[in-house]
Amino acid sequence: MKKSIILLGIILLASIMPTFAQDDISPERKQAIDSLALEKVRDLSRYISIIGNKETPWSEANRVIDRATELFMPGSKMAVSTLHSSTVQYHEVREYFNRLMRLNYDRVEIEWYNIEYVSDLVRQPDGTYVGVITIFQRFQAYDIEQGLVYQDVTKKDITVYVKRKETQIGGRLIGFWDVLLGDIRVKETTKQ
Amino acid sequence: MKKQENVFVLNHKLRKALNMAAILALAVFMSGSLTSCNGSKKMAKKELENRVEVAKQRLTAILDSETISIEDMEHELNEIKSWNFDTPKVRKLQPQIDEVKELMKQVDQKIGKVKKQQIEEVKIRLYGLLNNKTMGADDLERELNEIKALNIKDSEVNKLIKQVEDRIKELREDGGIIATNADMDAYFNQVVALAKTGNVETTNMKIKDILKFFTSPDAPLLIIVYKDNDIVDYDKPTTIGTYLNYLKDQKTNNNTTHSIERDNYGKIKLVELLKNK
């Protein structure tokens, strides 16, 4: 009886071993995932700059809005702050991009910098890796007559979700890391 | 009167002597000329013998050789033909001359056979060039020039050469072809370079041009982000159309082409990129 229990234990252990093995990814592989997630945030930064740019043709801006929206998990929200108000407003990301495109200035410059992890990607029980990336956004708005009329620097936190998925392409099974951005929260807004 | 008789006797003797000398000289001359005629005949025969022997050797060498070019064969044969074995009739050498003529006939046949073979080979090469969907205009032209240098006179070969020339022209008008991974990277970098100028219209035109090489703008594009033996991790799969616009938007290319898959018509149906470290 005792032997049977031990044997059963060994069988059970053997059956769950592959699961542990899958979770145990090498530092190099983890590094590649970290870099991929950071790259998605940099991509978003560039998209925001294009959408906000008044010289971007309308059709291009709309195409870029589609691409930028695809980076987010459905229902994700973007926090918006100004120096004029202490309240932070939240908009669905597509709505935020549409508002950004229509901002009532003659020229808008948006730049993201110091993009880095504040919380490393950590594997959750469901296999999703979750981390937080922080960015600094410099926003500058210009009027054709008055020049620079508004500027601020906002520190924002972006939650990042990375999950391994599989798909069939050209008869091949492709394993890929699906990186999706979650809510973007405002940490602080300063004049400079 | 006695003196006159003496002069007459002297003259008669001199004339006789002179006649004798003339006859002797003629005889000497005749005998000499007969000897020289016999010698030149012998020399001609000897020379013919030599030529027959040389011709046999050279013709046999041509027939035995598997590497001799058509030009060399033709050159050798024409030279041997110019020796004209028909003119001097030397009955004794006739069998050898006939042998040479037979060898010449065989060499003629060999030239014809090799030419036919060469035409077939060139046709295969030309069909290969026409069906090759990956070669660029420059490579096609280089191959074609090699074929043209063979100077083959054949109507079908000429027709195929013309078709390859038309294809080269078409390719040049289309702005080239994506033949290698490096070509693909070059096109991606062109999009980035144009995007950096800020001219959206020109960049979009370039993207449209590049898309001609693909089965459709929806042809899958995969980016390998990590690879270690059997473990291969990709970024989320995208399409070539989306990726070209991505390059335009981001104004940077951080990937290198890893592999290209084509359909039966040479159009690219899948691209795999490798993320630069």
Image (tube, coloured by chain):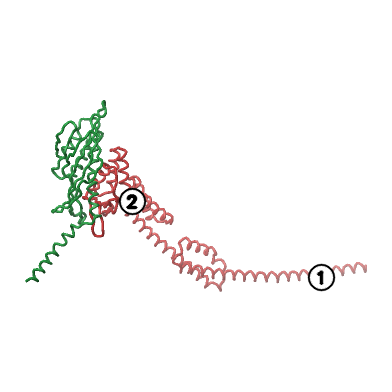
Chain colours: A green, B red
Residue at 19% from the left image edge and 55% from the top image edge: A168
> Taking the image as drawn, is residue A57 in sight?
no
Residue extending furthest top? A145
Pointer 2 residue: B182
Specify whether A189 is left or right of B178: left
x, y percent for residue B96: 52, 72
User: Is disc 1 in contact with disc 2, using a CB cutoff of under 8 Å?
Assistant: no
Inspect the image, locate mark 1, and give the three-letter code of the amino acid beneath it.
Answer: Ala
Residue at 69% from the left image edge and 69% from the top image edge: B33
Q: State the SS at label 1.
A: helix
Pointer 1 residue: B17
Inspect the image, locate mark 2, and give the three-letter code of the amino acid beneath it.
Answer: Ala
Which quadrant holds residue B148? Answer: bottom left
Q: Residues within 10 Å of mark 2 (few under 14, many from 20)?
A: few
On screen, residue A158 above or below B97: above
Marks 1 and 2, Cα distance to the nearest angstrom?
108 Å
Q: State the SS at label 2.
A: helix
- Observer-nearest residue: B120 or B253? B253
Indicate which label's residue lies in the foreground, 1 or 2. Answer: 2
Q: Tell me the subunit letter for badge 2.
A: B
x, y percent for residue A182: 16, 44
Q: Residues within 10 Å of mark 1 (few under 14, many from 20)?
A: few
> Could you say which disc has been placed on residue B111 in the image?
none
Residue at 18% from the left image edge and 39% from the top image edge: A187
Q: Tell me the subunit letter for badge 1.
A: B
